[in-house]
Amino acid sequence: MAMDLLRFATAGSVDDGKSTLIGRLLFDSKSIFTDQLESVEKTSQDKGHGYVDLSLLTDGLRSEREQGITIDVAYRYFATPNRKFIIADTPGHVQYTRNMVTGASTADLGLVLVDARHGLTEQSRRHAVLLSLLRVPHLVLCINKMDLVDYSEEVYKKISAEFTAFATKLNIPDLEVIPISALQGDNVVQRSENMTWYSGPTLIHHLEHVHVASDRDLVDVRLPVQYVIRPKSDDHHDYRGYAGQVAGGVLKPGDEVMVLPSGMTSKIAGIDLFDKEIPEAFPPMSVTVRLEDDVDVSRGDMISRVKNAPEPSQDIDAMICWMTTAPLRPRQKLAIKHTSNSARALVKDIQYRLDVNSLHRDLETKELGLNEIGRVQLRTTKPLLCDPYSKNRTTGSFILIDEATGVTVGAGMIND
Amino acid sequence: MTATHADYRLSQLDQLEAESIHIFREAAAEFEKPVLMFSGGKDSIVMLRLAEKAFFPAKIPFPVLQIDNGLDFPEVAETRDRWVQRLGVRLVIASIDDAIERGIVVDDGKTSRNRLQTPTLLNAIEENGFTAAFGGGRRDEEKARAKERVYSHRDEFGQWDPKNQRPELWSLYNGRLHEGEHMRVFPISNWTELDIWDYIGREGIEIPSVYFAHKRRVFERDGMLLTETPLNPLREGEVVTERTVRYRTCGDMTLTGCVESTASTIPEIIEEVAAARVTERGATRGDDRFSEAAMEDRKKEGYF
């Protein structure tokens, strides 16, 4: 079996031991190199730290090292013989919610860390809420610093029960609770000898084996067309291919398909992957589809099935995470990018602001500030080919762009 | 080769390839005048291969740009020329010597050629009106790169502002630019050194011969093995010996060190890389060693 890929997001501050945990994963999987370790050891010494500060491995920007905190999303890579891992390492504080949302947007799994001495905190609840909102299908709660509570099973059970009760209010299809000590290495890569009462997997074992292949939608065919390939050369005079990354379903030659928004139908003549014709395409393959009929297809269109197509709509109801200091207000106009499609959007209404700590809906607020999340109604200049985010994280998501500055100011998830 | 998958699983290399192709197509569709920065090194070769796949059977719809620092390995230049010829892409060359002559950059005799590459590159981007430049940067290379976006925005001075990067979510890339600004696009951000080698092995594509073990006359400087060349005069006490070496990266010949190695095939290189305990840049790039933030500083100015 070829090696596969797991993307996971971690959130937390240095106090939770998040950086130590990542350092431990990288170190024990032999992904830290001697020169990186030497540089960290030297910096730790220079700063007068009594221990090797593994957070220095991940906090890469000068300003972060100066302030001793993680500000931005950092991507880290390591691999075991069966799986490659991409970690989106994000800060935990509420003022960096947008960074957590960013890290979670591409994650298959979210890792929430709590300190065994303190149990669930507002921050750990918030992380779980954000992971659930971003529909990260797998969640791991690591109860860290078990060494500081004498590896107590009681502590584990109490926090585990409290979190499980809280999680029932969220969309978390898969939850695993693992007692660890990132500092001592218990249950991270090595099974702990101090917690014989725990019979579950170690963290690395869980990360290696969690089943992510069925998280993708293999039923509802969605191919957002990115690029029309027309070689205009003698060898390929009549070639016309529609290139894109499959966002859902399985496409096969001979399948009857519908192109949106035109609604025209045709059959798949062939699917190309570079110089080979392939028998089927599925997410997340980047392919080129040829159709039997000469229908008009361009960038921004969507190829789907005749009886199973996304709903073209100019009225978008979505949860939006606001990512800039100037607040989002009704009547504001923004650019919107959804799959390979761009349009303009008008903010019609802000229905409520979601308190990500308590899940309370604030119906009074009529604006969203930086790092706030709320339910918003948009009207777009042209129909977008939308699915609910709960069904498809690709065709259900969009970003909002400030037309004057060109900056990405919001991230949206379309409601059911 | 991607055939029928009974369980609809894609290997990690196939997933990385699909992501990179997506980025190429997105950028080619959205930017008016993209260019691919092609050094002839292994990362830029993988990048060019991915671009070839993204638009096949059409030709790659943008030119490639080479910054000629006058200090490239001849073997790298030869490989580069063969790739360009095979794909039939247009090659734009911006030479540092030419930039010095025209007064675009100043050679004070102290600054490394590596640093002169930045103004030369920025000038070439501006003169040609390129709005996006594909680069072969990988996030596993260096700490500053770990936080860089796939679409990395550059202001009208070509500068990168690490504290003010645009959020990048899902696979939705924001290509908005103002007049005079440009975007650096990094399609292989999520690849590691090992992924690059696995892919080169799988695809069976040509890379410069300096990556494979060969006999070379070298000398030691600052803990690195440098090649003997008239372009890099020996300093007092430096002694040339012949050793069996290979390069892990291909940059400036006078600054890029080689490692002693007998790895002469891709599988042997993969084995060596997997067992390596020092990053490729830490081991062999004199240009990254000056300070902890050397890369961040150069990137802010507009380096690759």
Image (cartoon, grey):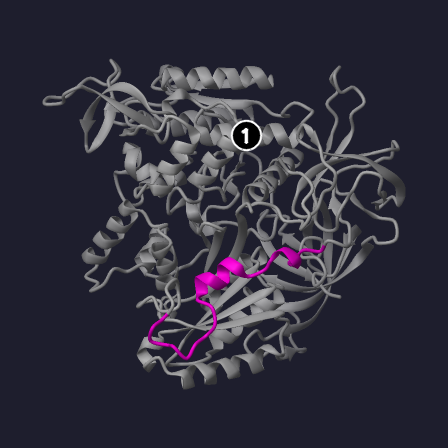
Q: Nearer the viewer, residue A149 or B170?
A: A149
Residue at image coords 44%, 67%? A202
Residue B41 appears in the rendering: yes
Residue A149 quadrant:
bottom left
Asked where in the image residue A56 lies, by quadrant, the reply is: bottom left
Q: Nearer the viewer, residue A250 or A372?
A: A250
Q: Is residue B89 in sight in this rendering?
A: no
Determine crowd level at label 1: few under 14, some 14-19, many 20+ residues with C-alpha closer than 10 A: few
* Whether residue A281 is situated above or below residue B199 in the rendered picture: below
Nearest the eye: B220 or A207: A207
Q: Is residue B32 left or right of residue B46?
A: right
Quadrant location of the C terminus of chain B in the rendered image: top left
Task: Look at mark 1 in the image and give the residue it sits on.
Answer: B203
The region drawn magenta spans A192-217
| Residue B74 higher or lower than B248, as above or below | above
Q: Name the dominant secondary structure of the magenta segment.
A: loop
Disc 1: host chain: B
Apparent side of residue B164 relative to residue B170 in the rendered image (left or right):
left
Q: Does the magenta stretch include residue A203?
A: yes
Please report the residue visible at 57 percent of the width from the left and 58 percent of the height from the top.
Answer: A108
Side of B145 where A253 appears, left or right: right
Measured from the top left, where is residue B125 in percent x and y? 50, 27
Secondary structure state at the residue bearing disc 1? helix
Spot occupied by residue A301 in the image (x, y as percentages of width and height): 78, 43
